[in-house]
Image (tube, helix red, strand yellow):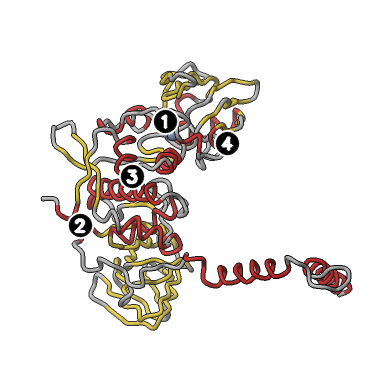
Amino acid sequence: MYKTFAKLNNIKKHISRLFFCTDGKLKKYALYYLLIFFLCITCCLTGCGKRPPADQTPQMDTSPDFFIRVLLLKDTSKAVITSSNNLNIISDTGEGKKYNSKLNITIFNNQLKINNDIFTGKKFEVKTSSPNIFSINDQSYRGYLKLIIDPEKNTFSVINIVPLEPYLTGVIGAEMPDYWEPQALKAQAVAARTYCLYIKKRFGTSRDYDMRKSQANQVYKGINAESKQVWDAVNETKGMVLTCRQTDGSENIFPTYYSSTCGGHTEDSKNVFGDDFPALKGVPCQYCKNVAKPKYYFWHSVKFDHKTVTEKLMSRYNSLEKLKDIVDIVIKKQTVYTNFTRVTAVELIGVNGKTDWLRAEDFRLAIDPSGRKIKSTIFKLTKEDDGWLFQSGRGFGHAVGMCQCGAQAIARQGADFKRILEYYYPGSKIIDVYNNN
Ligand SMILES: [Zn+2]
C-alpha cells in the first residue's frame, strides 16, 4: 500500500512539474500539453477513423461465384458465436432454430450441441440479418458462417462465407498499413481480388473452403482490419482483376502473388512455386529499399543446428526420411543478379549417400515456418560444425509478383495503381470481373 501511495505522490509531482513553474505559475506550454492530451483521448474513443465505415455488408445478394469461403477455425471442439441480432441455425437435415445473440457450440459423439440443443446434421449455416455482422471467439466478421463436422475426428470447422468486396477489406488492412499511399492500397486491392478469385477457381468444390486466413493464402482479419482508407481502396477498384495470356493462348486471371520486400529484384514464379505465367516474370526493383525497414531489407545472420534442420525438413517432407540423416546441403540452382544471388533449389545429401532436392522457398519455410528468421531465399549458406549458417540475407518474403514496399515507393513518386500493377505483373491487363462475359 505504501508503495502505491509513494507512486501516486511521484506521479503528482511529475504532473505538477509538467504544468507549473517552481513559483506556482502555469507554464507557457501547459495549454499545448492539455490540447495534445485531449486529442489523444478523443482518438482512443473514436478509434481514429479505424471503425468500419460501412454499416451494412454490401453484396449479400451477389452470385455464389462472388462469395469467398474463408476457413476461420479447423478441427475445433468448441466456439462461441455472438451477434447483436438473432442467429438462425439451419442444418443439412432441415432442422432449424432461432437464437438470441449468443451461441455456445460444442461437439459430442459427432453431434453439435448449441446452447442446450443437440442437432443431428453434419453441415450447418449460421446467419444473422442485416448488417450481417457477427463475432466468433471475439473476432468480428461479415457475411455468414458454415459449420462442418468431421466425423472421424469428432471436431468441426468454421467457415466464413463473405462476399468478395467486404472480404477484401478484411485482407487489405491486414496485408498493408492503411496509412500507406492510396494508390499502393488500390494496387494491393486488385492483386488480392485477383489472387482469391484464382484460388477459388482452381480448387472449386474439391474442398469446403477457398482461402485460409493466414499467409498460406492471404491474411484476413475481418472487421478488425477495416478502415475508411481500406474501404476506399476496395470501392474505387471494385471488380477490377488482372488477366494475362495463358499457355493455351486464352486471356485469364492468374495467381497474382505478392510479398513484402523483394530485396532488389522480384523472381520468376516458376523458380519459386513451379507455376509459369508470363506476367509472373521477375523485374528489377530499386524501390523497396526506400520503404522497407533496414532489418528486413538486410537481415541478420541466423543459425540452425543440425538436429533442428533434419527434424524440421523430415517432418514436413516425409519422402526425405530415406536420407536417414542430412549431412550436407548444396545450392543446386540460383538466379544471379548484379549485387546478389537468390537460391531457388537446394540438394540435400543423406548420411547413406542418397540425395533429394527442394525448392529453396519450401526449404526455408520448412526450417522456419514463421519466415521471420530466414526471411527470404537471398542468403549464403555455410556449413558449420553443428549446423548451418544463413547469412548475407536480403529481402522479406517469396519475392514473386508485386513487391509491397516497392509499390508504396512507386506510389510516393506519384504513379497510380495501374502503373504499379503493370510494373510488377508485366503484360497483364485489368478487366471488370462483374461485367466479363
Ligand atoms: Zn522490391
Secondary structure type for disc 4: helix
Whole-number angstrom distance, CA of label 2 to CA of label 1: 35 Å
Residue at 82% x, 72% y is 12
Quarter of the figure with residue 151: bottom left
Mark 2 vs 4: CB contact within 8 A: no
- Report whether 58 appears left or right of 369: left
**Where residue 294 is drawn, which disc sits there?**
4
Taking depth in this image into account, of 168 and 85 the one nearest to the observer is 168
Q: Which residue sits at x=34%, y=46%?
A: 187
Disc 3: CA contacts within 10 A as few (<14), some (14-19) or many (>=20) = some
Quarter, ligand 1: top left
Reading the image, the residue beneath label 2 is 65
Q: Are marks 4 and 1 in contact (CB under 8 Å)?
A: no
Q: Which amino acid does label 2 sit on?
A: Asp
Type of residue at label 1?
Cys
Q: Which of marks 2 and 1 is nearer the N terminus?
A: 2
**Screen quadrant of the N terminus:** bottom right
Sequence-earlier tag: 3 or 4: 4
Residue that mark 1 sits on: 285
Q: Check disc 3 and report the residue beneath it.
A: 416
The earlier-in-sequence mark between 3 and 2 is 2
Q: Do the residues labelled 2 and 1 touch (CB within 8 Å)?
A: no
Q: What element carries label 2?
A: helix
Q: How far apart are marks 4 and 1 (CA)?
A: 16 Å
Q: Position of residue 204 (x, y in %)?
A: 23, 50
The residue positioned farthest toward the top in the image shown? 353
Q: Reading the chain from its start, which is encountered first: label 4 or label 1? A: 1
* Secondary structure state at the residue bearing disc 3: loop
Q: How far apart are marks 1 and 3 (CA)?
A: 17 Å
Percent of width and height locating residue 60:
25, 68
